[in-house]
Image: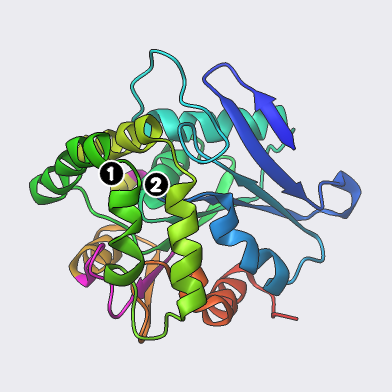
């Protein structure tokens, strides 16, 4: 296992094709709530890997990355941790950030914090901060503290997917949720509840927004709003998909992302 002890957190990560002599661009994957870097592993098999480096991480408080003691997590602090990891790994330029759900908020802040490093963003099912969103995630905190992660694992795999989701997809989502600690999950719920988008006028990079037509967790209105407010954004919709895009429709997501990255799938 690869861990990086950073100033802000201890982070578990996977680095695929790290040889500098072979790499022309780097793709960094930031997962959503109740998830892990393994959400993205299907893409590492289907995206063209020639001259492309993949860095996947478990965000602080999620999966194998412990919750930092005494710190309150925010989407801004999560973004700062990703940038610390990139510095730790010697990645200085030509970075595309792929975010899912909560990870989209993190990606947007990374783009604003390091415009010289980031050349593009892929936002899968982005949540848009609002009073209603904050209320939803504030209510999850006492629920998981009372009943544990089983309370989420019993509901989310069925409620948050579309018609294309297979029984294996639902089982995988359940395992991702059960792989979280209660305290870490609660801290990340709070990060979403207190989240902002920052200043979207500062996002000058190319941005691909991918929405599931049946996504109830991140409704289409949010994706459309991002598409209107970000200068260089484009929106694509995948039919029959809910909120867990990569594990519901890995090949479709891979094709769309690969086109955005400027290469074809293999």
> Which corner quadrant holds the C terminus?
bottom right
- Number of dots carrying numbers: 2
- Chain part drawn in magenta: 202-220
Find residue 95 and report its horizontal and vertical position in percent.
Answer: 62, 49
Please name the residue shown 36% across and 49% down the image. 102
The residue wearing badge 1 is: 197
Disc 2 packing (10 Å; few <14; some 14–19; many ≥20): many
In the image, residue 16 lies in the stretch drawn in magenta? no
Figure colour scheme? rainbow
SS class, disc 2? helix
SS at mark 1 in the image? loop
Q: Residue at x 68, y 37 (%)?
A: 92
Q: Position of residue 78 (x, y in %)?
A: 44, 33
Give above or below for 27 relative to 215. above
Q: Pick the quarter of the image with the N terminus.
A: top right
Residue located farthest toward the top when viewing the structure as drawn: 70
Residue at the limit of the structure toward the right, as seen here: 21
Q: Is residue 202 left or right of residue 63?
A: left
Q: 132 left or right of 226?
A: left
Disc 2: which residue: 108
Q: Is residue 60 left or right of residue 76?
A: right
């Amino acid at each position: 296992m690869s861990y990086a002890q950073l100033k802000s957190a201890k982070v578990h990560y996977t680095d695929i094709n790290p040889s500098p002599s072979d790499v022309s661009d780097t793709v960094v994957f930031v997962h959503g709530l109740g998830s892990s870097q393994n959400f993205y592993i299907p893409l590492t098999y289907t995206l063209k890997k020639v001259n492309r480096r993949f860095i996947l991480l478990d965000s602080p408080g999620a999966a194998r990355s412990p919750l930092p003691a005494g710190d309150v997590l925010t989407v801004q602090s999560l973004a700062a941790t990703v940038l610390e990891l990139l510095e730790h790994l010697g990645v200085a330029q030509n970075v595309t950030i792929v975010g899912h759900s909560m990870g989209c908020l993190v990606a947007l802040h990374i783009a604003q914090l390091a415009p010289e490093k980031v050349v593009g963003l892929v936002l899968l099912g982005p949540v848009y901060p609002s009073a209603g969103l904050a209320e939803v995630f504030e209510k999850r905190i006492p629920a998981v503290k009372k009943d544990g992660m089983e309370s989420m694992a019993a509901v989310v795999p069925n409620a948050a997917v579309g018609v294309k989701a297979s029984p294996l997809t639902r089982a995988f989502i359940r395992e991702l949720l059960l792989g979280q600690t209660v305290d870490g999950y609660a801290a990340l719920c709070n990060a979403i509840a207190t989240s902002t988008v920052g200043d979207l006028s500062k996002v000058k990079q190319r941005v691909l927004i991918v929405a599931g037509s049946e996504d109830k967790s991140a409704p289409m209105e949010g994706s459309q709003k991002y598409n209107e407010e970000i200068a260089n954004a484009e929106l694509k919709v995948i039919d029959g998909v809910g909120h867990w895009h990569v594990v519901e429709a890995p090949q479709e997501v891979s094709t769309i992302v690969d086109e955005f990255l400027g290469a074809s799938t293999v």
